[in-house]
Amino acid sequence: MAKSVKTSPEGQLHLRPAAMTYLRALVRANRRDPVEAREWFLANKAAYEAEVKQPMLGIIRHVTNAMLEFAPEHVRPAEKSFFRIYRDTRFSNDKRPYKEHVAAWWAHGALEKTSGAGFYFHISPTEVILAAGAYMPEKEQLAAIRHWLLEHHGELRAELEGEALRKHFELFEGNALTRPPTGFPAEHAGMDLIRCRQWGVSRTLPAEAALEPGLAENIVRHFRLAAPLVGLLNGPIVESLKPRKPLIFGLSGGVKPAKTR
């Protein structure tokens, strides 16, 4: 790749063709020997910063500002939403040192960066993916959602089957268990949802969508549609984090027992 790198213009809310050229070259380099891949990345790091990272941060900031209206709990600095390009290869047989896409994730402020339900998008040389929901909830979060579904499965089903959402998204497959989770009634009306290990929606667009001037607004429109779903899924998780009132002689809420002589 050429060594000279142009600075991205202020207010650019999409990628330029040079970014996709860079990502395609990254894929090729990443599949060589890891040492060679790292040498290539260092030699072309200026292109990554100017053509990929900085425009992505601009897109993320625009989307985050829009979230103040429909998902304020997910507003966070762009640098915290943007995923690092480096892969953690310490415990993996796959030693490719870099991810082959760039991505962002907006978590709920009360939850960890990669847990709970949130909003996600990524750009690769072959596609743009927009998604929202709970993709890999942690064990306790999974349990919180499932217990909530015992009484509220109809609410989640109605949201997932909403006309506007289904028009613009596809449902996650759910990665469902083959049997009911331990301790849950097998004949429950919401068992198809309770057996799932993920709940959410996604939309796959062609890679060329990353180059369109309306990319950031397209992301905002999709996330706005999915915000009620994300809110539903995060409700029981956030509620489970609240400290419970202590029990005093079997009574909650700090009620004192009557005095006796």
Image (spheres, rainbow, N blue to C red):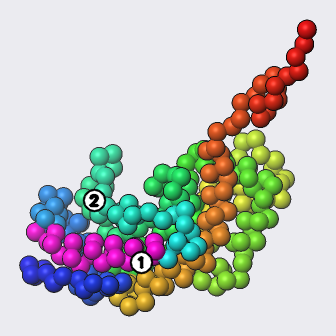
Q: Are marks 2 and 1 in contact (CB under 8 Å)?
A: no
Q: Which residue is mark 2?
A: 86
| Residue depicted at 63% across the width and 64% down the height | 231
Give the distance between the C-alpha atoms of the residues marked 2 and 1, in whole angstroms. Answer: 24 Å
> Taking the image as drawn, is residue 118 in sight?
no
Q: Which residue is mark 1?
A: 62
| Residue depicted at 40% across the width and 73% down the height | 60
Circle count: 2
- Residue closest to the eye, 33 or 157: 157
Instruction: Using the rendered view, name the quadrant where residue 14 is placed.
Output: bottom left
Q: Which residues are magenta?
A: 43-65
Few, some or many residues within 10 Å of mark 1 (<14, 14–19, 20+): some
Relative image position of residue 4 (x, y in whole percent) = 9, 81
* Residue 64 is inside the magenta segment: yes
As drawn, 22 above or below 197: below
Helix, strand or loop at mark 1: helix
Relative image position of residue 205 (x, y in whole percent) = 47, 83
Q: Is residue 261 left or right of residue 174?
A: right
Majority secondary structure of magenta residues? helix
Relative image position of residue 109 (x, y in whole percent) = 51, 56
Q: Amino acid at mark 2?
A: Tyr
As drawn, 241 above or below 261: below
